Image (cartoon, helix red, strand yellow):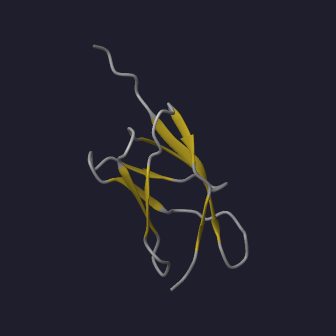
Amino acid sequence: MTTTAQNMQGTITDAVNGSPMNFVRITNMRTSQTSVIDHNGFYTIPANTGETIVFCYIGYNITRKKKPKCVLISTLNLAMAPP
């Protein structure tokens, strides 16, 4: 049986002012694979159905999201907020 690689992607913005965020660390908790977003706030990370992705940025709340089922590429746009 062949498995198809799946990804999660999207844009991360600041919940306070709406601007794209830079240098957010994104981690797949099952595989420990990490990614960093680009200067426009866009990210992509390998993630299979049900895997938890963690978004971290100093001075902001840590956010955890699960990859939805039955989709090869899931788009998750996220607005991160300070505590």
52 to 5, vertically: above or below: below
Residue drawn 38% across and 38% down?
A: 48
Residue 9 location in percent, x, y? 55, 44
Image coords of residue 56 (percent x, y): 43, 67
Q: Is residue 33 left or right of residue 35?
A: left
Within the image, what quadrant is residue 65 found in?
Answer: bottom left
- Based on the displayed image, in which of its 4 quarters is residue 31 positioned? top left
**Image vertical order of residue 22 relative to residue 76, above or below:** below
The residue lying at 32 percent from left, 47 percent from top is: 33
Q: Residue furthest top?
A: 1
Q: Position of residue 66 (x, y in %)?
A: 42, 52
Q: Residue at x 50, y 78 (%)?
A: 60
- Residue farthest front in this picture: 69
Figure quadrant of the N terminus: top left
Residue 49: where, in percent of width, then height? 39, 40
Foreground of the two, 20 or 2:
2
- Seen at 40% across and 22% down, the residue is 4
Residue furthest to the bottom in view is: 83
